[in-house]
Each structure stands twice: as structure tokens, then as C-alpha cells.
Image (tube, coloured by chain):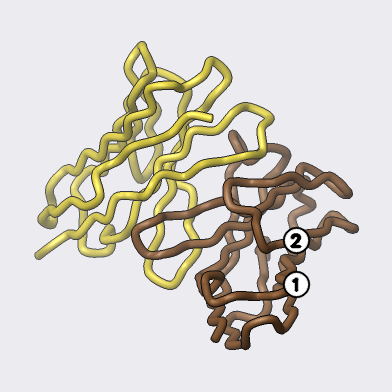
């Protein structure tokens, strides 16, 4: 299973773009990269998933370079409500055992 | 409404007193999983189940048991709880795979073992 490494914390200001990078050096061919967001006292919720290149949805973009050894979650123009912990997960297609990273605590200030 | 429910939401117990935390999902998902969350350690997987009667160990299975007798339910059993099992527990479910399908998490169960 690929181990993931993320920054423990990040600070930003409202309206800025935030990029959180996750390192997963031993990612396997069948692995996908998924990001979750967690607010205090709540369960995590899905943000975005990708396999390679770039994926974009209504809330975020995910950039994955060709070697797939890292990925970057991009949050455009963050607001105070984006203050949360963000987890990167590398999971095998069809697999069940999962290892989440420690998560990145994002603090957005006014 | 599609959801994962857990009960109880809060529990204070004493060392050695067996307890069960229930988890139920109404989305007909095959995959279910239990996690514990501790400060500074993120989410750690305890056990997972790929389908009925199919369960396997996650990263931190010691001191826990699970069963999957029906598709919708995946209870977590602590036969003899100890203080180091004080934690926030989350149950999750997804279509067929935890690795690629979106996981839906329950609201969490905060357990304190005295």
C-alpha cells in the first residue's frame, strides 16, 4: 500500500488559491488518488478523485504529474468555510485496505 | 436520504466491559469499513468488509472484532475495552471498493474508556 505524506498544516486568506500537495512515492499502477475534507466533529466527505493528469469539479482541481508520485489539490478562492482537514488517500482499484495520511489542517483567515 | 448511521454517538464505559458500536447504511453498498481517529494520527483503518461474510484486518485491528451478517450492518465489537481505545470512531461505506469508490462516512462515535 502506498504511504502518503502531506504538510501538517497550512494557512491562507480568503480569496486566495490554496494548493495542498501529497507525496506518494510508491504508488502502484492500479492505485487511484482521492481527497477528502473533514470539518470538526463530522465524518470526512469526498472532494475529488483522479488517476492521472488533471481532474476538475465544481469545488476543486486535482493535478497529477506523469510519474504519479505526488498529487496537488487546488482550492480556488478559498473562504472561511474551507477551514478543515484535508486527507489524501491512495487506494487500489478493487481494494479494501486503506491507509489515510495524517491530513493537512487548512486554516483560512479573513 | 442516503446515509450511514452509527450508534451510540457518545459512550463512556469502564475497562473490560464489552461493548458494540453499530453501523448501518441504506445505500446497498458492498464495502464497509471502520476507522479510528486520534489527535495527530489521522484516520486509521481498523477492519473492512468487501461484502457479506467477508471481513479483513486494516492497519490497527488489535482489540477489535467485526461481523458482516447482512449487507447493511457492520458492527464494531470491543470485547474487553481498554483506555487506549478511547478515540473517535467512524464507519464508512462505498459501492464495491474502498480504494476507488466514494466512501460515505457516518457521524462518528466518541468513545471514552475509563
Report the front residue among B30 and A102: A102
Q: Position of residue A41 (x, y in %)?
A: 43, 72
Q: Quadrant of the N terminus of chain B?
A: bottom right
- Residue drawn at x 39%, y 35% is A4
Report the front residue among B1 and A35: A35
- Residue drawn at x 37%, y 49% is A102
- Residue drawn at x 90%, y 58% is B69
Other residues around mark 2 within 10 Å, as few (<14) / some (14–19) / many (≥20): some
The residue indicated by pointer 1 is B79
Question: CB under 8 Å between callouts 2 and 1?
Answer: yes
Report the front residue among B72 and B36: B36
Q: Position of residue B53 (x, y in %)?
A: 88, 49
The residue indicated by pointer 2 is B65
Regarding mark 1 in the picture, which secondary structure is present there? Answer: loop
Q: Which mark is residue B12?
A: none
Q: Which chain is brown?
A: B
The residue marked by circle 2 belongs to what chain?
Answer: B
Left or right: A104 with respect to B85? left
Q: Which chain is yellow?
A: A
Other residues around mark 1 within 10 Å, as few (<14) / some (14–19) / many (≥20): some
Which residue extends farthest top?
A66
Q: Quadrant of the C terminus of chain B?
A: bottom right
Q: Is residue B59 above or below residue B4?
A: above
Left or right: A96 with respect to A48? right
Amino acid at each position: 500500500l502506498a504511504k502518503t505524506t502531506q504538510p501538517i498544516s497550512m494557512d491562507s486568506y480568503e480569496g486566495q488559491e490554496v494548493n495542498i500537495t501529497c507525496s506518494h512515492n510508491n504508488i502502484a499502477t492500479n492505485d487511484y488518488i482521492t481527497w477528502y475534507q473533514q470539518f470538526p466533529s463530522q465524518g470526512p466527505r469526498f472532494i475529488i478523485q483522479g488517476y492521472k493528469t488533471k481532474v476538475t469539479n465544481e469545488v476543486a482541481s486535482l493535478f497529477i504529474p506523469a510519474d504519479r508520485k505526488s498529487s496537488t489539490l487546488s482550492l480556488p478562492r478559498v473562504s472561511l468555510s474551507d477551514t478543515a482537514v484535508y486527507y489524501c488517500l491512495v487506494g487500489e482499484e478493487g481494494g479494501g485496505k486503506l491507509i489515510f495520511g495524517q491530513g493537512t489542517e487548512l486554516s483560512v483567515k479573513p | 436520504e442516503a446515509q450511514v448511521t452509527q450508534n451510540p454517538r457518545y459512550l463512556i464505559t469502564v475497562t473490560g466491559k464489552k461493548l458494540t458500536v453499530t453501523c448501518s447504511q441504506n445505500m446497498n453498498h458492498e464495502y464497509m469499513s471502520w476507522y479510528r481517529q486520534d489527535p495527530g494520527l489521522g484516520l486509521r483503518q481498523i477492519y473492512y468488509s468487501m461484502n457479506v461474510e467477508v471481513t479483513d484486518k486494516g492497519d490497527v485491528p488489535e482489540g477489535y472484532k467485526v461481523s458482516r451478517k447482512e449487507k447493511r450492518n457492520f458492527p464494531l465489537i470491543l470485547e474487553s475495552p481498554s483506555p487506549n481505545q478511547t478515540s473517535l470512531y467512524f464507519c464508512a461505506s462505498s459501492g464495491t471498493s474502498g480504494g476507488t469508490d466514494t466512501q460515505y462516512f457516518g457521524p462518528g462515535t466518541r468513545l471514552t474508556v475509563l
